[in-house]
Amino acid sequence: MVWAGIMINGRTRLHVVVNGTMMGQRYIDEVLLPYVRLFRGAVGDKFVFMDDNATCHRTLAVQDCLDSEGIRRLVWPARSPDLNPFQNE
């Protein structure tokens, strides 16, 4: 699995998930805290985080983490090519 972030003025490097499955706590530790929290701080109050309905994105721990960091989420369908900017360049 690979995770990447995009924003109006750029994108992140690819984060490759090796050795195992992406679960809620791993998603928090490897994606939300090192990447998303940083972007939220740089963008400020207008920051909106978009992810899909992957199981690891929907755990209570992930929602608690986003809430505690003040990160608003825009929900969109899992695996939807219509909404995937990487597949629609």
Image (cartoon, helix red, strand yellow):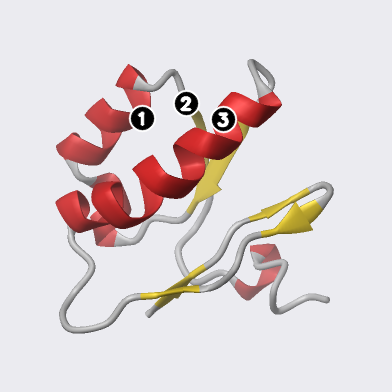
What is the quadrant of the N terminus in the image?
A: bottom left
Secondary structure beneath disc 2? Answer: loop
Question: Mark 1 or mark 3, which is nearer the start of the sequence?
Answer: 3
Secondary structure beneath disc 1? Answer: helix
Q: Where is residue 78 in the image (x, y as percent from the top left)?
A: 45, 64
Q: Which residue is drawn at 15% across and 80% down?
A: 20
Res 50 quadrant in image: top right
Q: Mark 2 points at which residue?
A: 71
Res 45 quadrant in image: top right
What is the quadrant of the C terminus in the image?
A: bottom right
Q: Where is residue 24 in the image (x, y as percent from the top left)?
A: 19, 52
> What is the total number of numbered labels drawn onto the structure image?
3
Say which mark, if any, is on residue 45: none
Tag 1: residue type?
Answer: Leu
Distance between mark 2 and mark 3 Cα atoms: 7 Å
Q: Position of residue 41 (x, y in %)?
A: 57, 26
Marks 2 and 1 close (CB-CB < 8 Å):
yes
Q: Mark 3 points at which residue?
A: 40
Tag 3: residue type?
Answer: Arg
Q: Which of marks 3 and 1 is in front?
A: 3
Q: Is residue 21 left or right of residue 14?
A: left
Q: Which residue is drawn at 82% across and 47% down?
A: 8
Secondary structure beneath disc 3? Answer: helix
Res 66 quadrant in image: top left
Q: Nearer the viewer, residue 38 or 80?
A: 38
Q: Name the residue under label 1.
A: 66
Q: Is residue 19 left or right of residue 28?
A: left
Question: Mark 3 or mark 2, which is nearer the start of the sequence?
Answer: 3
Distance between mark 2 and mark 1 Cα atoms: 5 Å
Q: Where is residue 2 in the image (x, y as percent from the top left)?
A: 44, 76
Marks 2 and 3 close (CB-CB < 8 Å):
yes
